[in-house]
Image: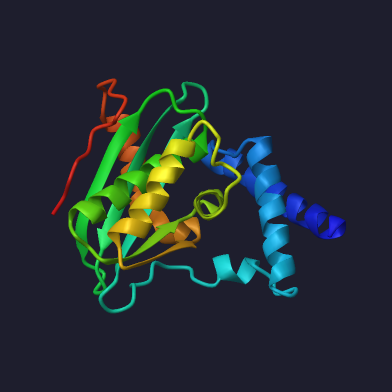
Amino acid sequence: MTQLKVVLLLWLWWTERNKWREEGRRRTAVEVAYVTAALADRFQKQDGVSLLPEIRQVQKWTKPPPGVFKINSDGAFDSSSSHGGWGFIIRDDQGSMVKAGAGDKKFLMNPLHAELLACQAGVRMAASMGLSRVILETDAILVKAAVEGDEYRLSAWGGIITELRLLLMSEFSSFSICVCPRLCNSVADALAAYGSCALSDDMLCGMMYLFS
């Protein structure tokens, strides 16, 4: 188990180095440590089957199953100013956009905070539209782990996580959370970037732009 954690840590360390060099964003040391432990645990439970193909197999966005809507979300975070943005897009089983949104957010704590706000906005919109079956797709492994686990229940953003869980369980007849490569999340990524730089008002709840 220790050797497995070391290998996963080195892999994540290299990934974060590339993200910082190419995108100017990275996780904190605590987040990297948590992801390492979570991946190691899942690797053990899956009887040695590698989780890497699960993330890398698909290199383009894929349509959801018939009757299901897919919510792609992403967050943007600037560590120098603690300012960022969020974005989401909801598409149907034909790949057509149903709704999209973007907003800015000041006083963010870290990238995970921005990612969770993006998920929250997308899920809220899907619930308000009366959609019954959804897939929440993100390129942040930590978001899936945080929503499905209890490690962040008492954290500063525990309220966002709790609301996400309640919305998913109470507003939809079926739901799932999946992780995709950043390449498959490019539209949500662009919306998050737009939200972080196009809006100037200092609104704690953010501002949403909708496209239909």
Q: Quadrant of the C terminus?
A: bottom left
140 on left or right of 185: right
Q: Residue at x 56, y 41 (%)?
A: 152
Residue 122 location (% of width, % of height):
30, 50
Name the residue rendered at 25%, 45% in the picture. Answer: 101
Q: Position of residue 180 (x, y in %)?
A: 48, 62
Q: Quadrant of residue 7?
A: bottom right
> Which is more toward the observer, 165 or 86?
165
Can residue 191 be seen here? The reply is yes
Position of residue 106 relative to residue 11, above or below, is above
**Measured from the top left, where is residue 79 in percent x and y?**
52, 27
Left or right position of 182 against 53:
left
In the drawing, does residue 13 fall left or right of residue 177?
Answer: right
The reply to whether residue 17 is in sight is: no
Question: Does 68 appear above or below 136?
Answer: below
Question: Which quadrant does the N terminus fall into?
Answer: bottom right
Please name the residue shown 61% across and 45% down the image: 151
Name the quadrant containing residue 129: bottom left
Query: Is 104 left or right of 82, judged from the image as shown?
Result: left
In this orientation, which residue lies closer to the viewer: 203 or 164? Answer: 164
In the image, farthest residue toward the bottom: 66
**Residue at the right extreme, as displayed:** 3
Above or below, 208 relative to 170: above
Display colour scheme: rainbow
Image height of 211 relative to 105, above or below: below
Give coordinates of residue 81: x percent, y percent: 46, 21
Count of picture labels = 0
Q: In front: 69, or 188? A: 69
